[in-house]
Image (cartoon, rainbow, N blue to C red):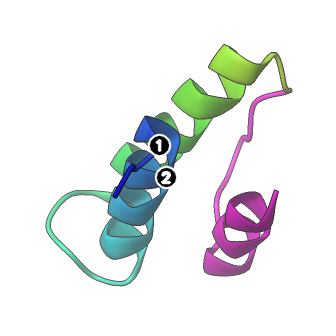
Amino acid sequence: MVYRYSDVLLKKAEAILRGGNGPVGDALVLINAIRTERGASLFTSLTLDGLLDERAR
């Protein structure tokens, strides 16, 4: 099975947002790292709905 690194980061960010270890700001940093790599604009805040929308992209 092959996993994309960005999917792993998205799963980690989701775990943080759902109450896992680490501050919520860490999830935002992970998402913005992916968006920077893809040339997309950065998020200034992150909600669970926003994260799920990002995973759908």
Is the residue 5 above or below the residue 28 in the image? Answer: above
For badge 1, the amino acid type reads Arg
Front residue of 20 and 55 = 55
Q: To which residue does mark 2 refer?
A: 7
Numbered circles on residues, count:
2
Residue 15 occupies quadrant? bottom left
Looking at the rendering, the stretch of residues picked out in magenta corresponds to 41-57
The residue that appears at 74% across and 41% down in the rendered structure is 43
Label 1 and label 2: CA atoms lie apart by 5 Å
The answer to whether 19 appears left or right of 28 in the picture is left
Mark 1 or 2: in front is 1
Can you identify the residue that label 1 sits on? 4
User: Residue, x 19% and y 58% (percent of image)?
Assistant: 22
Residues packed near mark 2 inside 10 Å, few (<14), some (14 to 19) or many (20 plus):
few
48 vs 21: above or below? below
Residue positioned most to the left: 21
44 relative position to 9: left or right: right
| Residue that protrudes farthest toward the front in the picture | 1
